[in-house]
Image: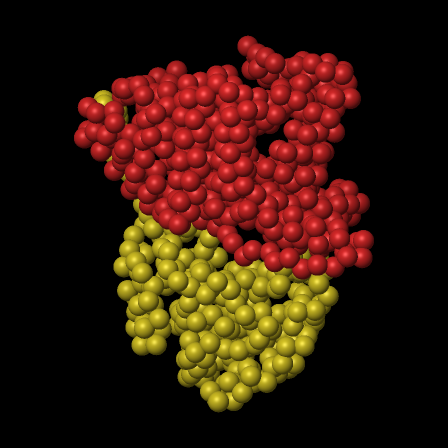
Chain colours: A red, B yellow
């Protein structure tokens, strides 16, 4: 079920009403309702793949219990290994099998050895990378004694499949989300109101920004050979906003929906395009995944408390895995490497934590230095986005070559009115987010008087109503 | 909780009222509609609106989105263009042609500039709801919709709410099965296109108006080798030779750098195509 569909517009109020009016007296029944609703939500897309979520949940539930029963290091390691094998195995089969097979065939062919193992023709289960990482984090935390395993199977299954964040995150940690299933939830007016505003903001980002950008982006990337450099620049510029609005829009709707049910999910985006350097960008972009890699891979590898060569190795590993997590394609791997190359100098010069505080703190506008930093960071990310969006690495290189050497300073060929409208929407997006950059989301306007709040919400709703696009309604991150 | 629900309810009423006021304002004013609305079928709506405009021009141009790139809508010297999209279907083109010619007796030539692929539309494509049902499925046009067309429309759900302002003004369209894409490897004319080309021919004949079809410049690498025999047979079988007599000879092929996709032009492509087409078929149409 898509957040921006009529189905969800009917589904959400029904679950909300049953949740608060009929099951609010019994926590167990409330959790059963959430679990059922989550399975309906996921099964709406393809009920057969529910078995994968159940399998992942079962394995980690019993691994958790197993870990609590034994202190023997070898047995504990074996249990953890079981969880890793099952979760990464599911991912490996459904997401990476064909990639490895075709690359092995290619590599062996290079050395003159021919063999033809079969590739599998299977669709990628939606959100598989998100829920497998979430369940895996539970087993890892139990193994490290960071959290106690639960015996409440309903609560655990509901934690794994919690519908607001099931298919595209934020990738929650058991230590944050699981305890919320054991506590009685009370309806909080302010939290629910702001959750509703956050949902509205997420819909604006998805339906107005991302889906409208998609129209130009798709035609640009599928036809880059015939377009001028300036048109290609415009294409990747709009892609930067498409991917941001699409993914952070989903996160906003997910977090807002969870708040309606009395849950607090972790923040996933913190206005990344206002970052002054690439290190800050990565602290603000897809926070739940970045911190997941930091806690479960980077720090166990030694993090930045090792010698310089190992720091470089660790950073490369993280960005490589991050790229590969996004998809079984060399383009994502190159995207990861490019980001590592941008990031490492800052780390080696100890400048990666220069910009911790919010940009233009207590000021209306950034100073020149901050502004140039924001601009430079944005252009660096644009360069990397070309690889992220292209079908092959060769396409990306050709795209960049044409962009810089085939009429970069000409008038773009895309329809001027469509492009101008998109700029107008992007200005609205950036204005709201800049104004509220100290807050959780762009439409957190509870500080306004009620009449002003009504005007602002009405404005955003009308923009969504009149300017949404139905041409690219799937969320990009579903495929990851 | 009650405070939350009350606020959501008030908000709902408030938004509904604002939207209603906007609808009334925009709907009564086609120019505002064109500026404000972000409707994907804007071109079709404006073509329908312009078809009731008075004009002294003698040549009317109809066509798909490729044609619209070359002949912008409205009056331009000695021709008037009502080109919209192929998704408006031949039924839509017939309706706007009839409206315009009924209102403007000076018209003596109607030219349909149509990509050979566009003839395939049989009211069964993705954008049929937005580009045909919403703009044309009005009470005033029902008598122009044939039984065959009506039968096809019946398979499209929610046509009864298509004229509701909130539906009409937005890009919403229902989910239903439709053809995902046109066939880019074959030239043929759909049944509905054949039927309505015949109606257009008859109408023009009765009004003593010359009516013919020409093709816009085509992508050489895609269309040069597609045989026209099937399309020509359909033309013969349906007695449309007079309408298609210049079609094959109007084929001009351009290399792919003049196109942004399979059929639409880049800026340079538009300039070249305009020069080729306008010079040969519009300003000098009398040579035919």
Residue A333 in the image: above or below residue B115: above
Residue A197 in the image: above or below residue A479: above
Drawn side of residue A124 relative to residue B148, left or right: right
Drawn side of residue A352 relative to residue A152, left or right: right
Nearer to me, B27 or A347: A347
Give x and y (percent) for residue A158. 35, 32
Q: Which residue is drawn at 50% across and 29% down?
A: A79
Nearer to me, A473 or A424: A473
Q: Which quadrant is the C terminus of chain A positioned in?
A: top right
Give x and y (percent) for residue B255. 73, 66
Give x and y (percent) for residue A135. 46, 31
Q: Which residue is drawn at 70% across and 50% down?
A: A104
Q: Can residue B23 be seen in this view?
A: no
Q: Is residue B65 visible?
A: yes
Drawn side of residue A419 relative to residue B191, left or right: right
Q: Which quadrant is the N terminus of chain A positioned in?
A: top left
Q: Residue at x 78, y 21 (%)?
A: A309
Residue A179 in the image: above or below residue A416: above
Q: Which residue is drawn at 59% across and 48% down?
A: A97
Give x and y (percent) for residue B268. 71, 58
Drawn side of residue A49 relative to residue A124, left or right: left
Residue B155 in the image: above or below residue A357: below
Tally of numbered discs = 0
Nearer to me, B206 or A63: A63
């Amino acid at each position: 079920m898509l957040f921006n569909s009529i189905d969800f517009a009917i589904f959400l109020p029904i679950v909300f009403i049953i949740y608060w009016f009929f099951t609010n007296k019994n926590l167990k029944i409330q959790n059963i309702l959430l679990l059922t609703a989550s399975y309906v939500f996921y099964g709406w897309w393809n009920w057969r793949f529910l078995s994968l979520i159940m399998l992942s949940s079962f394995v980690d539930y019993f691994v958790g219990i197993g870990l609590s029963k034994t202190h023997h290091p070898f047995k504990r390691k074996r249990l953890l290994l079981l969880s890793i094998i099952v979760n990464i195995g599911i991912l490996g089969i459904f997401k990476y099998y064909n990639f490895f097979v075709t690359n092995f065939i290619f590599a062996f062919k290079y050395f003159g050895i021919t063999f033809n193992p079969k590739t599998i023709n299977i669709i990628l289960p939606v959100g598989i990378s998100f829920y497998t990482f979430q369940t895996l984090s539970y087993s890892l935390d139990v193994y490290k004694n960071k959290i106690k395993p639960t015996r409440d199977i309903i609560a655990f299954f509901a934690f794994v499949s919690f519908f607001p964040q099931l298919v595209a995150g934020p990738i929650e940690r058991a230590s944050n989300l699981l305890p919320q299933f054991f506590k009685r939830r009370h309806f909080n007016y302010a939290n629910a109101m702001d959750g509703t505003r956050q949902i509205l903001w997420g819909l604006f980002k998805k339906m107005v920004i991302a889906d409208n950008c998609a129209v130009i982006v798709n035609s640009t990337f599928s036809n880059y050979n015939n377009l001028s450099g300036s048109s290609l620049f415009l294409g990747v510029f709009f892609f930067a906003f498409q991917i941001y609005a699409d993914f952070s829009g989903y996160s906003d709707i997910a977090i807002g929906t969870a708040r309606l049910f009395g849950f607090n999910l972790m923040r996933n985006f913190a206005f990344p395009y206002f970052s002054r350097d690439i290190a800050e960008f990565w602290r603000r972009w897809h926070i739940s995944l970045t911190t997941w890699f930091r806690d479960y891979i980077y720090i166990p590898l030694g993090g930045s408390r090792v010698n310089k060569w190992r720091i470089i190795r660790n950073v490369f590993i993280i960005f490589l895995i991050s790229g590969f997590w996004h998809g079984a394609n060399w383009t994502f791997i190159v995207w990861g490497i490019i980001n590592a190359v941008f990031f490492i100098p800052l780390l080696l010069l100890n400048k990666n934590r220069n910009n911790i505080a919010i940009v233009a703190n207590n000021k209306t506008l950034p100073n020149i230095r901050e502004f140039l930093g924001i601009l430079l960071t944005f252009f660096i990310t644009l360069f990397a986005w070309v690889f992220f969006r292209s079908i092959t690495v060769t396409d990306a290189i050709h795209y960049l070559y044409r962009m810089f050497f085939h009429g970069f300073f000409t008038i773009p060929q895309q329809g001027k009115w469509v492009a101008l409208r998109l700029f107008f929407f992007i200005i609205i997006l950036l204005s709201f987010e800049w104004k509220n950059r100290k807050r959780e989301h762009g439409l957190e306007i509870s500080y306004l008087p009620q009449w002003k709040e009504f005007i602002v919400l009405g404005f955003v709703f009308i923009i969504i109503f009149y300017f949404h696009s139905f041409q690219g309604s799937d969320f990009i991150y579903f495929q990851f | 909780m009650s405070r939350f629900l009350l606020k959501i309810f008030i908000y709902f009423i408030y938004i509904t009222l604002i939207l209603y006021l906007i609808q009334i304002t925009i709907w009564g004013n086609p120019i505002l509609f064109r500026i404000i609305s972000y409707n994907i079928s804007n071109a079709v709506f404006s073509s329908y609106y312009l078809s009731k405009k008075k004009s002294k021009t003698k040549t009317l141009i109809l066509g798909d989105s490729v044609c619209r790139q070359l002949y912008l809508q409205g009056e331009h010297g000695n021709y008037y263009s009502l080109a919209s999209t192929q998704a408006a279907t031949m039924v839509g083109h017939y309706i706007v042609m009839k409206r315009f010619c009924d209102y403007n007796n000076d018209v003596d030539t109607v030219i349909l500039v149509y990509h050979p692929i566009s003839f395939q539309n049989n009211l069964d494509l993705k954008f049929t709801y937005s580009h045909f049902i919403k703009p044309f499925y009005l009470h005033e046009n029902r008598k122009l919709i044939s039984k065959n067309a009506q039968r096809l429309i019946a398979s499209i759900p929610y046509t009864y709410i298509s004229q509701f302002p909130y539906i009409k003004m937005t890009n919403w369209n229902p989910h239903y099965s439709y053809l995902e894409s046109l066939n880019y490897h074959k030239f043929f004319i759909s049944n509905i296109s054949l039927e309505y080309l015949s109606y257009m021919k008859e109408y023009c004949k009765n009004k003593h108006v010359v009516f013919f079809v020409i093709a816009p410049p085509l992508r050489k690498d895609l269309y040069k080798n597609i045989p026209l025999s099937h399309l020509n047979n359909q033309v013969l079988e349906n007695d449309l030779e007079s309408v298609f007599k210049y079609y094959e000879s109007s084929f001009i092929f351009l290399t792919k750098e003049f196109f942004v996709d399979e059929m639409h032009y880049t800026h340079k492509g538009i300039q070249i195509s305009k020069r080729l087409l306008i010079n040969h078929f519009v300003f000098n149409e009398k040579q035919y």
